[in-house]
Amino acid sequence: MTDTTPTPESQSLRDWLLTDTPTSRRHAKFASFYKGWLRLRSNHMAMFGFAILIGLLFVAAFAPWLAPHDPYYQELSNRLLPIWSEGHVFGTDSLGRDILSRLIYGSRITLYIVTLVAMIAPVAGLLVGTIAGYAGGWTDVILMRITDIFLAFPKLVLALAFVAALGAGIENAVLAISLTAWPPYARLARAETLTIRSSDFISAIKLQGAGPIRIITRHIWPLCISSLIIRVTLDMAGIILTAAGLGFLGLGAQPPSPEWGAMISEGRRFILDHWWVATVPGLAIFTVSLAFNLLGDGLRDVLDPKDEKS
């Protein structure tokens, strides 16, 4: 009997990805990813945010070639030059350092903080939330009461307390932000787990002899990932603002690092006469935060399992 299963060679790749009858699990994953990408691409605001973030990655990766000056070089004869001065598009700060160059190198610090927090906080929250939701009983009560304690304090206040205890520095700031960011992910993962654990397929897996660890890691975690990705993307703006707030207070990246919050702190002394020193890094923070929010809204439309169109 001849196999008439369609393949990418016998039909266009697009038709192969848009088929409603995938021929394998791998085919189904590719088709689902492509359909999600098409939905995301149709959201113009989400693509606008995505383009900004791609630009940020490009700037951070090629900072040594894009920056017109050394971000640490001080030239007091050129201090506080206005925007569009010769050789200084965004002017200079109080020590004569080129603001554009410092913005470009500061993008590396911003991405460094965002990446580390995104690697620590959601993973910790996922672990705590799924264990609490699946185990139930006293385990759930204890873990959720600990989560409630962290949620009782404003994030910035709690981050300030941790940084004060750990000491100033960018690594300690990342750790402090992560310690304040994980509770919402734990709540979200617990809610998803409570819904999933009573499903028929979980009962079938138990009958096959699967243990709690296998059920959590192989069957519950993958179903929680999409909700966590949406929440992480939407939380990135808050993480950036918290990091900038710590830098503004002198508890984040230390001078002479070109951290955007520290640049605003330095420029606040000249805000009336030399507004660009603080305004330009502030606009950079606003733009990146807006980009994450726009992308997060688009991903929510694509990944939300409760959306009937997904």
Image: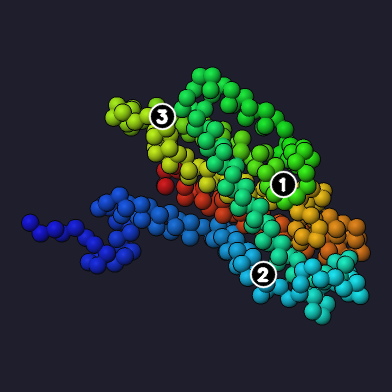
Q: Which residue is mark 2?
A: 63
**Mark 3 belongs to which amino acid?**
Pro
**Mark 1 belongs to which amino acid?**
Ala
**Real-space Cα distance between discs 2 and 3?**
47 Å
Are the residues at dot 2 and dot 1 in contact (C-beta closer than 8 Å)? Answer: no
Residue 157 seen in the current view = no
Residue 101: x, y in percent?
Answer: 74, 70
| Residue at x-position 29% and y-position 67% | 12
Are the residues at dot 2 and dot 3 in contact (C-beta closer than 8 Å)? Answer: no
Residue closer to the observer: 150 or 43: 150
| Residue at x-position 61% and y-position 38% | 182
* Number of the label disc, if any, that sits on residue 212: 3
Label 2: which secondary element: helix
Badge 3: residue crowd in 10 Å (few <14, some 14–19, many ≥20): few
Q: Earlier in the sequence, mark 2 or mark 1?
A: 2
274 vs 258, left or right, is right
Q: Earlier in the sequence, mark 2 or mark 3?
A: 2
128 vs 259, left or right, is left
Label 1: which secondary element: helix
Q: Which residue is mark 1?
A: 173
Residue closer to the observer: 167 or 194: 167
- Give the answer, above or below, for where 206 lies relative to 236: above
Badge 1: residue crowd in 10 Å (few <14, some 14–19, many ≥20): many
Quarter-of-image position of residue 37: bottom left
Residue 236: x, y in percent?
Answer: 63, 49
Q: Quadrant of the N terminus?
A: bottom left
Q: Earlier in the sequence, mark 3 or mark 1?
A: 1
Residue 156: x, y in percent?
Answer: 74, 41
